[in-house]
Amino acid sequence: MNCLLDTCALLWLALEPKRLSAPAARAINTAPRRFVSFVTIWEITLKNSIDKLPLPEIPRLWIPRRLDFFQIEILPLLPESIFLSGELPQIHRRSEEHTSELQSPCNLVCRLLLEK
């Protein structure tokens, strides 16, 4: 199955791989194709710009190099995916329930689209 990495999963893979759970690492390593969303790139860039996410180099250089190194493709965020994300059952009601296991409604939409 293809794998869509959320922001935390990409950061942990690239900067702190030991933070990935065994199932997450296995899913990433065995996926025929790996993806990140445009939103992940945006989030990393914004957090870095306000000094909440230090990186070894500026995001414009660091992100493409990490994506190339880990063979991760950028998945466009299409309006239909956004609309579908609002129609899925809510898995997480509070931000503290967020995990790197790719369970948010938006990621589920993207995973469903990738499995076709």
Image (cartoon, rainbow, N blue to C red):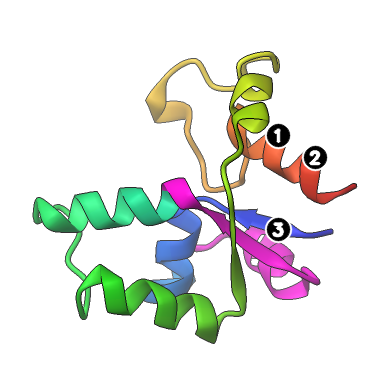
Q: Could you say which quadrant of the image residue 70 lies in?
A: bottom right
Residue under label 1, please give it. Answer: 109
| Residue with the mark numbered 2 | 112
Q: Are marks 3 and 1 in contact (CB under 8 Å)?
A: no
Q: Is residue 52 left or right of residue 112?
A: left
| Extreme-right residue of the structure | 116
Please give the range of residues in magenta. Answer: 20-39
Amino acid on which disc 1 is placed: Val
The kind of residue tagged 2 is: Leu
Residue assigned mark 3: 3
- The spot of residue 95 in percent (x, y) is 39, 26
Earlier residue among tags 3 and 2: 3
Element class at badge 3: strand
Q: Residue furthest front?
A: 79
Q: Residue at x 61, y 16 (%)?
A: 86
How far apart are labels 1 and 2 at the CA level?
Answer: 5 Å
